[in-house]
Amino acid sequence: FFFEPLAMSEKTPIRVGLRNFMTNRLLMRKQFVVECEHPGRGTVPKKELQEKIAQILKVQEVNTVVLFHFKTAFGGGKSKGFGLVYDNLSACKRYEPKYRLVRLGLASKKSGSRKQRKEKKNRLKKLRGVKKAKAGAKKK
């Protein structure tokens, strides 16, 4: 089903439709396919779609709306992706993968590169006891 277009920050309005809507009580969320029509403009930012879907579904907390896997159709003007709306923020934090929580700003990314973390781990393997605790604390 489609909803009336609302003028957003960009020059042309977008039209959002939700398909295959289902309620997943086990994971405390609603799941759906999002179809977005945006003629005459580029890909719509997920933040903008998140606000619009929260408004459509009357959700108070915008961060409980999670959007992902968006693909723009050839020639532009249409995009499809998946959406989840969690019942509350704690359910969102519990069931969402960490990388998506980082995208939403609900979790922090690990500091340092992968190589640095591995090197630190291997350095700490050589130490024991108090020295290991001190080395781990000051390197962070």
Image: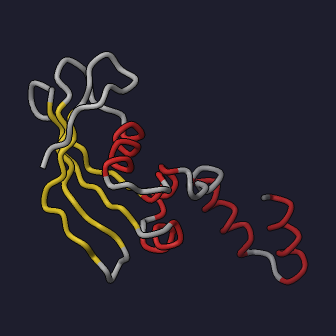
x and y percentages locating residue 81 in the rendered image: 22, 49
Horizontal relation, residue 40 to residue 60: left or right: left
Question: Relative to the observer, which residue lies in front, 18 or 33?
Answer: 18
Horizontal relation, residue 1 to residue 65: left or right: left
Horizontal relation, residue 115 to residue 125: left or right: left
Identify whether 27 is placed above or below 73: below
Question: Relative to the observer, which residue lies in front, 94 or 53?
Answer: 53
Q: Residue visible at 35% across and 78% down?
A: 27
The answer to which quarter of the image holds residue 73 is top left
x and y percentages locating residue 14 in the rendered image: 24, 30
The answer to which quarter of the image holds residue 129 is bottom right
Identify whether 130 is placed above or below 106: below
* Scheme by which the image is coloured: secondary structure
Q: Residue visible at 16% across and 23% down?
A: 39
Identify whether 98 is placed above or below 69: below
Q: Residue visible at 32% across and 83% down?
A: 26
Number of numbered tags placed on the structure image: 0
